[in-house]
Image (cartoon, helix red, strand yellow):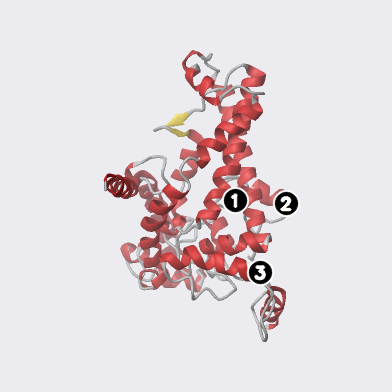
Amino acid sequence: MQKIQEIIAAILDQMVNVLMYPLDPNNRIYALYIVSSIVFAWFVYRAIKSRGADNTDQDTDAAKGNFLQFLFPKRVWSHPSAWLDLRYMMFHRVASYFLLLGVGTWALAAGFRLGSNGVAFSDIVASASSAPAAGLVFSVIYMIVVMMVIDFIAWAIHYVQHKVPLLWQFHKVHHSAEVMHPISNFREHPIDNLGYGLIIGLGYGLVQGLSVRLLGYAPNIPSLLGVPLLMFLFNFTAYNLRHSHIWLRWPGRWSMIFPSPAHHHVHHSCHPEHLDKNFAFMFPIWDVIFRTYHMPEDNRNVKFGIVEDSSDLNSCLRLYWVPFRDAYRLFRKPGKGEMTHEESADAKAERPGIPAE
């Protein structure tokens, strides 16, 4: 009985933690990041109003009312997908917390030990206060190196999630949202979370370990409100518009340097020209280098969702178990009258406007 009470208490504690996300600077829906995104949205709204007939149909329709209606359009909030995201955030963040507890910490410690040639992560944490203070310039350079390594690892994971059919069955959960708002960021499958936690944790630990091995210490990363400065700026510059209906594209080539919300909108679009594009999270340069970068001038062809039928991804539990079912179907021998995965993709390719997977 006591064990059951402890489990219930742990679940309730995690539910409270999720509700406190807007007060946590380390969370993407921190109140300050939401406010800054609203400010960016205001400028987008005014720009649409001033352009008049030069707008796309999507922007004209979105900005036909007042600013509050622009932020919360009926076409988004009347859609079942929007409300599923709200339910799923609580369900997923509570369930996955217990499923993945400790994975990232273990991976970080393992990567650190590998990079430092056997030094235990706990030993370096205990002596961190005695580490020499690096100069500001050196600390900034170290921060950029760390963030670029992590972002490249994330880009590579993201790429294979789209290219490997088995991994796509789980990643498609995130792409199955047909409308988006900031909470859509949490529409993820725990298998995705497991992959990112393990591999990014190993990579981050490896960089820190190599730093200790080469320099004798790991430089402190400049931070603001306890968040690495570069990550804080990334979150502050309209991060929450990445998962939204509001198209914001940085001018000229700036979108190749720092990701605009439009960069991620294209990634979520199921238009044939947008499929498997823009995998980067913080540095679009990876997409430029590996030729997965695509940035249209406007949002006229952007349509959120996936090519395949996602009608059965319609509940919290189904978002969890349907990918396992579909992954199983990739490998089982099809029954009489059933198509293989490749035949299904070919059939979709023959339908107008529907590309093969």
Q: Position of residue 282 (x, y in %)?
A: 57, 45
Disc number lying in front (1 or 2): 2
Is residue 38 something one can see in this rendering? yes
Q: Quadrant of residue 294?
A: bottom right
Residue drawn where x is 66% and y is 64% of the image = 165
Q: What amino acid type is highlighted by mark number 3?
A: Leu
Mark linked to residue 71:
none
* CA gap, disc 3 and disc 2: 28 Å
Q: Name above or below for residue 167 compared with residue 33.
A: below
Q: Earlier in the sequence, mark 1 or mark 2?
A: 1
Q: What amino acid type is highlighted by mark number 2?
A: Phe
Label 3 crowd (10 A; few <14 / some 14-19 / many >=20): some
Q: Nearer the viewer, residue 312 or 130?
A: 312
Q: Name above or below for residue 343 compared with residue 261.
A: below
* CA gap, disc 1 and disc 3: 37 Å
Position of the C terminus by quadrant: bottom right
Residue drawn where x is 61% and y is 27% of the image = 113
- The kind of secondary structure element at disc 3 is helix
* CA gap, disc 1 and disc 2: 16 Å
Which residue has dot 1 on it? Answer: 255
Q: Position of residue 27 (x, y in %)?
A: 41, 44
Q: Earlier in the sequence, mark 1 or mark 3?
A: 1
- The kind of secondary structure element at disc 2 is loop
Q: Name above or below for residue 287 compared with residue 24.
A: below
Q: Earlier in the sequence, mark 3 or mark 2?
A: 2
Label 1 crowd (10 A; few <14 / some 14-19 / many >=20): many
Which residue has dot 3 on it? Answer: 330
Mark linked to residue 290:
2
